[in-house]
Image (cartoon, rainbow, N blue to C red):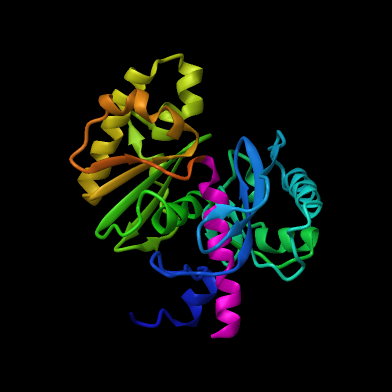
Amino acid sequence: MPDPGPGLAAEYVAIPASSAALTGRAVGLDIGGTGIKAAVVDLATGELVTVRIRELTPQPATPDAVIDVVASVFAALQETGALTPDMPAGAGFPSVMRAGRALTAVHGNVAWVGADVRELLADRTGRPFVVLNDADAAGVAELAYGAGVGQRGTVLVLDLGTGIGTALFADGQLVPNIQLGHLELRGRDAEARLSPVARKRRGIGLRQWATELSELIARYEAYLSPDLIIFGGGMTKDYPRFAAHLHSRARLVPALLGTNAGIVGAARVGSARLLDATA
């Protein structure tokens, strides 16, 4: 693969190949619109080796408030005794990320735009972080340990949580910061109409929701022609109830890691810091 050059290398985090066999442990942090959670992960298996520490995302989710909760989560994780000072750390964050900075508003909070998330996390936790988009982190986990293991071609991971996060892979390689949840659908932002939160706000059942979601999937197919679409996030548990109402030319499967995918993927990418240091 061609060298991306120093500019791109500085802007985008290194992603271990989906097929790479890693060893050791890393801590993963998943900052979401509803909850902030973290755990220590076995990089060989993708399994959590500590309890998952979770606290609610503060509202409003200002930088100071969110970082305070992160500090509280890490303090609780420290008490497990599994979090060592030199353990690599990665974080999934709900924004377009470049060079550790948030480039888009986080759930409507514009105070995050331009914020150095990597630096904020390091200052409060006392350890360096690798930071990537939260849906990208979940996708990395599913490709390495879950429903996308060994899958070639084009894979689209839908992170159906507070919003509609999307992660895109071509032959196992991540295309970062793909924000396909914000395509227009029926004259509105798709996420505003079809996210799990929007579904509850609208009071519609899973059948109607899945039927409308199929319209969005058809848009994805027109642009990307995915070979596989993985449904993850909080809606994974409901997949058997709405799968029959989905329509797609692509193969459709539920995610295997559920709501832990963001933690696991963040930890896997966090380990790249050590790989770089020993290269």
Q: Position of residue 259 (x, y in %)?
A: 53, 41
Q: Is residue 214 above or below residue 229?
A: above
**The N terminus lies in quadrant:** bottom left
Q: In the depicted view, which residue is nearer to us: 44 or 194?
A: 44
Q: Position of residue 162 (x, y in %)?
A: 53, 34
Q: Is residue 223 above or below residue 204?
A: below
Q: Position of residue 76 (x, y in %)?
A: 79, 47
Q: Is residue 19 visible?
A: yes
Image quarter of residue 143: bottom left
Q: On the picture, is 121 further left or further right than 274?
A: right
| Residue drawn at point x = 36 percent, y = 54 percent | 168
**The C terminus lies in quadrant:** bottom right
Q: In the depicted view, which residue is nearer to us: 65 or 15?
A: 15
Is 269 colored magenta in this rendering?
A: yes
Residue stretch in magenta: 259-279
Q: Residue furthest left?
A: 249
| Residue drawn at point x = 75 percent, y = 47 percent | 73
Is 159 colored magenta in this rendering?
A: no
Q: In the depicted view, which residue is nearer to us: 131 or 271?
A: 271
Q: Is residue 186 visible?
A: no
Q: Is residue 68 above or below residue 23?
A: above
